[in-house]
Structure formats: structure tokens, C-alpha cells
Amino acid sequence: MSAVLAPIKPAERIWVVGAINGDHGALRTVHQKLAERITPGDRLVYLGNYWGDGTAESVVATINELLLFRRYFIALDGVDIADIAFLRGAAEEMLSKLQQIQFAPNPGEVFDWMLTRGIAGTTRAYGFDPAHVQSIMRQGAHAISQWTSQFSDALRRHSGHSALLSDLKHAAYTTDGRLIFVHAGLDGSRPLTGQTDTFWWGGSMFEAITERYYDCARIVRGASLSQTGLQEREFTLSVDGGAGRGGMLIALALDGQGKIIEQVTSDA
């Protein structure tokens, strides 16, 4: 399998966390509940969209909270670093592309599109006003290159943030082939290694899945633009509770066939 895919050993309980979207309060609440439940032998998969369109303080605190809980989980006796995986969400895909936006044929239009998808909160998190950045995107390649360099430096000044971004996986799967974990989409006509950007932008393809995908019992995703809330179907499971968008954060414990064992949310 590809290096951008995370193999997960089968387990009796695999915890998955839906899209966070920079909602630190929701993530903190879910982590407090998870800390009381998660044990060595469990697996933990975050399904993307950690950065988001929240306040600058909330977005930064969200990433710091993820790093802290990763340390907590890995420090448990009997837990291996391969027992936890972080998937790359649409927010993280945009964050990566933003640092190379000077190479886009039309940076201004690309950034405008990113603004409609929530990149403003991420730019604010590292000290930049989205409106000012928008004007820079019309000033030519040299000005844009200077800005992307400044932005990347600001990202690196936050300990662990760049490292987390570079460590994200495109998807995860249990090594027995029974479960697949994606951020938002999956093209049922292509193998896992041939999905290109479908993982981030192929939500409608995921929703069209009505048949078993190879030998997979269930495909689990963390983000949906059209279906907020827990959406359970025969072969798919969607875990976007609307965190960061007025909803809640959902975390589930699944068995080896993708059946829900336990659910925790950021709601009281």
C-alpha cells in the first residue's frame, strides 16, 4: 500500500473522531470523555478538518489539544505509535496548497475559493488578516512568494503544527481489509490507491455508495457538507456532527466490522 495510507491493526475497539473545524471547546470536551474510556489495545483515528474557520485562538488551541492528547494516548503502557492515525482533511489540504499558492495560475481566484471553504480562520490563526492576504494575491508572484514564506514561518513558530501537517495520511484501513477510514469522499469504482483528491472533494461519490467496496465491511468518513449528524448506512458511516459550524463533535468506538459500540459527543 501507499505511504500516504495508514495501516491500522484490527482491534476490538477503534475510536474515530469526526471533523473538528477548529472548535477547541468541542474537542476538549470529547477528549475529556475519551480519556475515561480509551485503553491500551484500542485504536484512534482522527478523520480530518482540524484547522477551521473559528477564532485565531480557538484554531491554535485545537491543534495544541490534538498534540497533547496524542502524547497522552501514546504514553499509555502498551500503546504503539501506529495505534493512532491523523487523516488529512479538506482544511489541511487547503493549508498545504496555501503555502504554495504562488505557483497557481490564478492565485487570487484560488484564495477566493478557499475563503468560501473556511481558510480565513486558518490565516487568522497565524497572524494574518484574510482581507489583506486577499489583496496580496493580486500583487504578482513576487509579493505572493514573500507572503507564503512569512506564513510558513509563522506556522513553524507554533511547536508541532508543521510536523502534524506533514504527518497526515490520505486515508486509513484495517490490515484485515474490513474497515476503511476517509475524510469526506471515496470513489467506489477505484482502488484506495487511485483516489487522487476524491478523499477531500468527493463527498457526493461517498453518498452514492450502495454496494460493498471490495471486502470492506464499512467505510467511515468524518466530514460532510450536505449531511450533518451521524449517518449510518449498510456499507458507510458518516460522523460529522457539525463541530465548528454550530453543531457538535462526535466520536465513536467501532468494532472490527464497523458497528457502533459507543458514542461520545461534545454535548453535555
Image (spheres, helix red, strand yellow):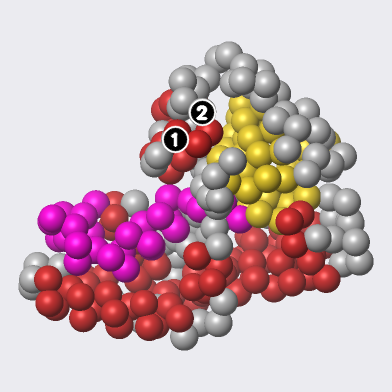
Q: Amino acid at mark 2?
A: Pro
Q: Is residue 139 left or right of residue 88?
A: left
Residue 72 image position (x, y, % from top left): 78, 70
Circle 1 residue: 195
Query: Please, what is the dominant secondary structure of the magenta stretch?
Result: helix
Count neighbours of disc 2 (C-alpha within 10 A) and say few if under 14, some if 14 to 19, many if 20 or more: few
Q: CA distance from mark 1 to mark 2?
A: 7 Å
Identify the residue under disc 2: 191
Task: Identify the residue at image location x=38%, y=62%.
Answer: 96
The picture places residue 173, in percent across and down from the top left corner, at 66, 39
Q: Residue at x 51, y 53 (%)?
A: 88
Q: Write the start and end of the magenta stretch as one range.
A: 86-113
The single residue placed furthest to the left in the displayed view is 139
- Which amino acid type corresponds to the residue marked 1 in the rendered image? Gln
Tag 1–tag 2 contact (CB < 8 Å)? yes
Seen in the picture, residue 39 relative to 256 is either above or below; the reply is below
With 83 as the anchor, is 213 left or right in this view? left
Give the x, y percent position of residue 48.
54, 52
- Rendered-image quadrant of the C terminus: bottom right
Report crowding for label 1: few under 14, some 14 to 19, many 20 or more residues within 10 A (C-alpha).
some
The verdict on residue 194 being magenta is no
Image location of residue 241, percent across then percent down: 59, 44
